[in-house]
Image (cartoon, rainbow, N blue to C red):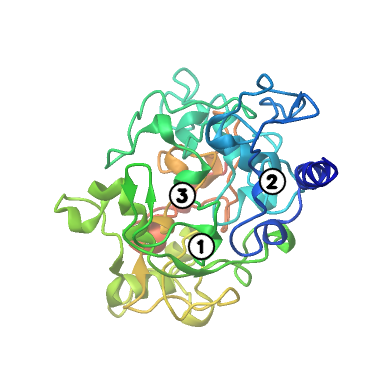
Amino acid sequence: MKASRLLILAAAAVLVTGAPALAFHDGGVAACNGCHTMHNSSNGVAMNFNAAGTGPGTAVGTGFPYLLLYGNKSDVCLRCHGTPGRGYAVWSADPAAPTAAYANRGGGDFVFLQEDNINDGRGGATAPILGHAAGHSVISGIKNTNADPVLTTSPGGTYAAANLGCTSCHDPHGTSSYRLLYQDGQRAGTAVFTSTIVADGIALSASGTGETTTNHNAYHSGYSAWCGTCHGNFHQRSSNLIHPSGEPLGDDIATIYTMYNGTTDCIANPPAGGLPCGSGVAATAYLPQVPFEDPATAVGSTAGPTGTSRVACMSCHRSHATSAPNAGRWDFNILGMATDGVISGSYRIPNPYDGGQRSLCNKCHSKDEFDHPEDFTPVP
């Protein structure tokens, strides 16, 4: 029993201290008893915790599914990753005032699932959009979040919302892939992944306010095909009429991206000599709010794309959640970024340009070159 007590104490220590992810997972399989309990008891006391992590959740001799310490796979993850300040945290305490480093980095922040309204578009005051539409609605007893009541399967696919959790995308038992994401050929329930993501990530504990132009995730390859495992009908190869993903930008779009430096700059520097609007230059064109996929990019790169760089799902979406519908990196339903968060009262997504900025779709499509600056008066 002495050895047994030591193992139990070790498991408790991991849960209480919330050791940094790499220390616990060690780049792969973690200590088994950090997540599982074989017999669910020690000295006649149930070992596994309730949803709040404060006491026994089942009777002695019974256990949660898969011998987990908690009744839900995501809750096992969120006991360490769902508390601000702990290693690789993904969930702030308050959706109205999230931790900036969580909300403004690659994956975004799951806390927006707890918002009561993220609709800043038409009817936002009278027709609120609830937080379940903010991104991937992971099911958690700790956070009191449920399956998406509207999208019961993955948009563009058939993955059941009732099964969605952290382990739908991340392999808790270890993989050499970026952020422990599943690799080509691995299965998560009914989903069989068809790609491996290759990327370099910023050091999350030192990311400050999130990604910047000189400190950002570097997406190399694999994203669109990987997301297509569950959202396949949204992808170019589905034969549907949809936005390209996983496809080269081409020279024209790459040039637009490079020269575009915001609505005001675009209007002040209209198209000339066959070139698009703007005064941007290739060496400093990178915008972390609108990333692209390229094997040559690095976490400190400031250069814009080339014609062979690719648009991918993460160019417009974050993988966890945002304060815009559909996990948008910006709100696709509003005219100008100055209006973000005004009607809904939700977190205002930072604007990389000035108060007259239109949608960041223009970083690649530049449709505001002949507009008038007075049309975009910033909202107080």
Mark 3 → mark 2, Cα distance in angstroms: 20 Å
Q: Which residue is mark 3?
A: 169
Q: Amino acid at mark 2?
A: Gly
Task: Kindly identify the amino acid type of the residue bearing the numbered disc 3.
Answer: Cys
Could you say which is closer to the camera, residue 96 or residue 160? 160
Tell me which residue sits at (55%, 66%) in the image: 217
- Nearer to us: label 3 or label 1: 1
Q: Is residue 339 above or below residue 241?
A: above
Residues at discs 3 and 2 in contact (Cβ within 8 Å): no
Does residue 164 appear to the left or right of 32 in the view shown? left
Q: Residues within 10 Å of mark 1 (few under 14, many from 20)?
A: some
**Residue where numbered disc 1 is placed:** 175
Q: Nearer the viewer, residue 380 or 316?
A: 316
Q: For residue 380, say whether it is visible.
A: no
Could you say whether the residue bearing mark 1 is in a helix, strand or loop?
loop
Q: Residues within 10 Å of mark 2 (few under 14, many from 20)?
A: many
User: Between disc 1 and disc 2, whose residue precedes?
Assistant: 2
* Among the 4 quarters of the image, the one containing residue 196: bottom left
**Residue 113 drawn at (x, y percent):** 55, 33
Query: Residue 253 in the image: x percent, y percent?
Result: 32, 70
Q: Which residue is mark 2?
A: 34
Question: Foreground residue, 241 or 88?
Answer: 88
> Residue at the location (42% across, 34% down)?
163
Tell me the kind of residue under disc 1.
Thr
* Marks 1/2: CA–CA distance: 18 Å
